[in-house]
Structures are given as C-alpha cells and as structure tokens.
Image (spheres, grey):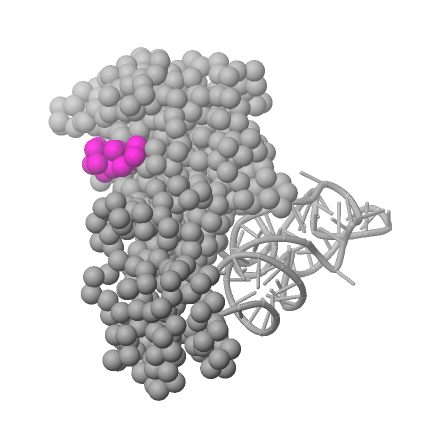
RNA sequence: GGCCCCGUCGUCUAGCGGCCCAGGACUCUGGCUUCUCAAGUCAGCUACGAGGGUUCGAAUCCCUUCGGGGCUACCA
C-alpha cells in the first residue's frame, strides 16, 4: 500500500474520548492535528468519541470543547460550528453505525457471536496457560442455523464480530514507515456490543471515511488497532486511494518513564490554566515534545508553528514531560507580553486571590505596577503575591523578616530615611533613590545591600520584592513613611 | 508470554557516511552584573545502551543483544 490522498485537500481530525479532563498527551495530539491542518491549508475536524457511555460525561465533553478554545486551537468542523458531515458527537450517529454493522452482517464480513464474557475469559485463560497468542478463537465464526437457534433459545445475546481473513495488513505510517501485522495476531474483533451500541473500532473507521478524513494523526497507543480499522474500510468497500494516511505520534511520558498520569505529574490542562500558564507557552512547549523545526529554534508563536510544522519532522520516539522547561518557556512568553496583554491575563488572578476588588483606583495602580514585576515571574499565579504589598489594608511585616530590622543598625537606617523622605517634594523613584543614596550610602557609608534591605522590609514587608524605589513610588509618600515609622516600633 | 513501536547529555532535541574527540535549549554548578528576587551575560558538567559487522571512514547502513513502552476488552 502506498501513501494515499496525495492529491486531495487535507482533512485532519482530533477525536478524543472525553473520559476525563483533556490531558497533556491529548493536547499535544490536538496541537499537531491543528498545526498540520493549518500548515497544509486543510480542514481541522473535531469529533467527540463518546461511544463508551459509561465513562464519557457531558461535563467532560464541554470541558474538552472549552479547553481547545482556550488554547486557540480553532476547528473548522465539529461541535458548535457544525459542518457538512455532522453530527460530530458519535452518540448522535448510532443509526449510521447500526446500518453499517447490518451491512457487514449481510455481506458475511461480520457475524453474530454468542459467547458469553465468562466463556471468552476462560478461552483467554487457557491460551495464556498454553502460551499461545491470546484472542478470540473463532468459536462462532461458522455456526449452523441449528446452533444459532439453540443459543437464542438459551436466551443468549449476541455481539457483532468482524471476520479477519487470513493474511496480513501492511500500511505506511507517515512517521514510522511500513508496519505489518499478521492476522494471526489480529483476532476477530467486536463491532457492536450485545446491547446494540457500537465500539470504537467500528465508529472511528466509519466516521473517518464518511467525514472524508485524509490524515489520522493520533497517539501511538492506537497503532496496533490500525489493521482493524483498515478491515472495516475494506468491508465498507472503500477504495484504497481513499484510505486515510496514518501517522502515529510518540507518547508524552512522565518523569518516571511511564505514560503521563496523575501520579507522575499534573496532566489536566485545567490545572495549568489555574497555575497561570499561558496557552501559547503550553502549545510552544508541547510542540517541542516529539517535534522540532529542524534547527536550533525553540521559541515559536502559534503562527510560526503552523508555518513550520510538518509530519516529516515528527519523531518516532517518546518524549518525557519536563515541567522546568515549560516554566522557562512560560516565563519567556510572559516577558514577551505587551503591557495590555499582561494586564488582561493578570487581572483574573488578582481578583480571584482577593488582592484587589477591581475598582478604578486599584486598576490604575495595577497597571503602573505590572511593568516592574513582569520579568520576575514564571507563572501568572505569582502576580498577587508580588503586588499584595501595594493593596493590603492591614500591613504587617513578614514574621521571618522582623528580626532583620529590629537591630539598632537597621533602626538608624530607617530613622535617617524618614528624615530625608518626609521633606521630599518630588515623589518619584529617581528622586527617592537619589535622596536615600546620598543619606545612607554616601553620608552614613553603608553598603547598599544593607541599607536597602532594611527599607525593603519596612515598606514591602518582605526581603524579596520588586525594585525598591519603584515600589515606594507606587506605594506613595504617606504610606511609605507611615510604614517606615511603624517598622521602628518592631 | 505473543505481536508491534522505540533507544544521542539528567530532560527536550540537532545530526540522515567524512563539516561531530557530537551543536542548541532546559536543569544543575560557578563567575560577572546588581538595592532583594528575577532578568541579562560568561563559563563549566554531562550523551551516540552494548556487541559484532559493512566501509578508507559510522551517532548515521546491516545483524544480534539488552533496555523502555504500547497492545493483547462487549475501553479508547
């Protein structure tokens, strides 16, 4: 089989099964799907695979939609936007799958299987014991009418099983090259449950064909299910050139080299959002997991990603997720924000933390203060902590810092500072700095580090703060002075 | 166990037979800068899993082996 679809307009789909919040691995797949569609000028289709009704919930479906939107991965066909091949929730397409399953039955490609779960388990058990390839043993492949009648008389319910012919399936994976599976290791598989609901293997294959998907970029875990999908295409009568091209993306692993999960790192995108990671940082970092532009370039915008992304540059080997690198990129992206953007991103964190209530005076002060903290944070959730000193009603010095300003040397610094700050007529950071340096450094002969640490603690309450003179300017003359006076009493 | 995929610094990667006693980024360590913290900047540490081939020459090609992972459901 050769690479199909060479001449057609590209259509890529992202088709998660929302059995929980979308996680890092899902998003990396979605990102590659999206980037590939955009790069080729093709269509990005978003489909919800909710055939497993016991695990998929409406909440998870909505969360998946919201997450994709938040990340900026817009789709051309799918939930909310519609499209020519809808509906895009598999739960709304049940009749379609049923029709095809019936057709496969009529054609003899599929058959009813009356084996009970217990019986199947017993077969597998025996196979394991005998050390042979496990899988369905074909028990119901060629039942006579009498045998069927007997099973039905017992009240047994049947699943629909696909008949795998002898031979093998070879397909060309766009990332891994030719992959072959001998059908000896691809047992007859179930298409429809006893209750009549379709399984993934049926729904995914039918939909990819009906929705005219040309490229399937998905996780490596689905690699071994590919021959089953191809078998469904064959039963559907799809021409070889209309098969989608498969590209199986490498895994995103956790620190301990196991598939990423809650145990070895935070995986839910909702968590990253709450922590204050920017969507662009997440996408930039994830893009680097299993793909690279081919040179030393690492900082890419979403736009650049769509220009640079090709499947040829995707790796075949798995990548470990590294929070530190994500943090570094997030810091870079935050620093690259315009002031307006930085403000918009920060505001929700400030109000949620209760640092400000959101009135005009506060907003104005926040806007003035943001520039001095922009290069000092890694995540947006650090903003409230850095600006808190400007807004607290009940100011108090950090208990651990109190002892550092209770010595006589510090008191001298604070006293002398008051003397020069109180008469200061122009309250801007340059004037404040000039006055303090003249008095404390030149006149008293103190080391800047010593002198300013005392003032920093007194005015901001902590040994760590944004630049001191800018902070005092923002704080205002009267507040700065009263805090210094108060610190003298500690 | 069987089938399939994968294997370059701690991590992400560049590398497609000579440009590589292996380059970049993150982390880490040390220096500079400095009012703290950051940012910036300089330097350092550390890798081709192993063994055989092929070749004048291999991280790059072949084989074996070891290691990791996935699948092996009326999950996806």
Q: Residue at x 32, y 13 (%)?
A: A103
For residue A82, which quarter of the picture? top left
**In magenta stretch: residue A469:** no
Residue A297 position, x and y percent, is 60, 44
Instruction: Indicate the quadrant containing the C terminus of chain A: top left, top right, bottom left or bottom right.
Output: bottom left
Residue A92 position, x and y percent, is 24, 21
Q: Residue at x 41, y 74 (%)?
A: A453
Q: Nearer the viewer, residue A365 or A430?
A: A430
**In magenta stretch: residue A58:** yes
Instruction: Judge left or right: residue A387 versus residue A468.
Output: left
Instruction: Judge left or right: residue A361 versus residue A7.
Output: left
Range shown magenta: A52-66
Q: Nearer the viewer, residue A54 or A269?
A: A269
The answer to whether residue A164 shows anywhere in this view is no
Q: Nearer the viewer, residue A380 or A341?
A: A341
Magenta-drawn stretch, dominant element (helix, strand or loop)? helix
Instruction: Indicate the quadrant containing the N terminus of chain A: top left, top right, bottom left or bottom right.
Output: top right
Residue A370 position, x and y percent, is 38, 51
Q: Is residue A459 above or below residue A182?
A: below
């Amino acid at each position: 089989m050769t690479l199909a679809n060479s001449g057609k307009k590209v259509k890529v789909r992202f088709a998660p099964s929302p059995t929980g919040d979308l996680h890092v691995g899902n998003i990396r797949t979605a990102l590659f799907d999206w980037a590939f569609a955009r790069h080729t000028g093709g269509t990005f289709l978003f489909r919800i695979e909710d055939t497993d009704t016991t695990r998929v919930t409406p909440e998870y479906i909505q969360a998946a939609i919201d997450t994709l939107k938040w990340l900026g991965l817009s789709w051309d066909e799918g939930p909310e936007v519609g499209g020519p091949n809808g509906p895009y929730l598999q739960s709304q397409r049940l009749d379609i799958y049923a029709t095809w399953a019936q057709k496969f039955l009529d054609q003899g490609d599929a058959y009813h299987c009356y084996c009970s779960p217990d019986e199947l388990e017993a077969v597998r058990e025996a196979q394991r014991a005998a050390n042979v390839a496990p899988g369905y043993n074909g028990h119901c492949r060629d039942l006579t009418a009498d045998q069927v009648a007997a099973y039905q008389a017992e009240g047994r319910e049947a699943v629909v099983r696909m008949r795998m012919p002898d031979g093998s399936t070879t397909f060309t994976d766009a990332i891994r090259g030719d992959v072959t599976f001998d059908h000896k290791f691809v047992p007859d598989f179930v298409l429809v449950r006893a209750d009549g609901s379709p399984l993934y293997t049926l729904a995914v294959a039918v939909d990819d064909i009906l929705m005219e998907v040309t490229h399937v970029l998905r996780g490596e875990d689905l690699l071994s299910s590919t021959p089953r999908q191809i078998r469904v295409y064959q039963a559907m009568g799809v021409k070889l050139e209309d098969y989608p091209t498969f590209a199986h993306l490498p895994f995103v692993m956790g620190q301990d080299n196991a598939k990423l999960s809650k145990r070895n790192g935070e995986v839910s995108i909702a968590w990253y959002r709450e922590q204050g990671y920017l969507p662009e940082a997440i996408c930039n970092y994830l893009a680097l997991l299993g793909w690279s532009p081919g040179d030393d370039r690492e900082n890419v915008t979403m736009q650049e990603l769509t220009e640079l992304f090709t499947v040829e540059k995707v790796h075949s080997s798995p990548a470990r997720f590294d929070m530190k690198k994500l943090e570094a990129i997030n810091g870079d992206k935050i620093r690259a924000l315009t002031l307006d953007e930085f403000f918009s991103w920060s505001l929700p964190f400030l109000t949620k933390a209760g640092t400000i209530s959101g009135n005009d005076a506060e907003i104005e002060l926040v806007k003035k203060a943001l520039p001095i903290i922009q290069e000092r944070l890694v995540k947006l959730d650090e903003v409230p902590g850095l600006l808190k000193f400007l807004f607290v009603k009940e100011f108090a010095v950090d208990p651990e810092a109190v002892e550092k300003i209770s010595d006589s040397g510090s008191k001298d610094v604070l006293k002398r500072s008051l003397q020069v700050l109180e008469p200061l007529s122009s309250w801007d950071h340059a004037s404040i700095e000039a006055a303090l340096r003249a008095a404390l450094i030149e006149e008293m002969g103190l080391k800047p580090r010593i002198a300013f640490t005392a003032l920093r603690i007194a005015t901001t309450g902590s040994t760590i703060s944004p630049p001191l003179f800018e902070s005092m300017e923002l704080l205002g003359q009267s507040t700065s002075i009263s805090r210094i006076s108060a610190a003298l009493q500690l």
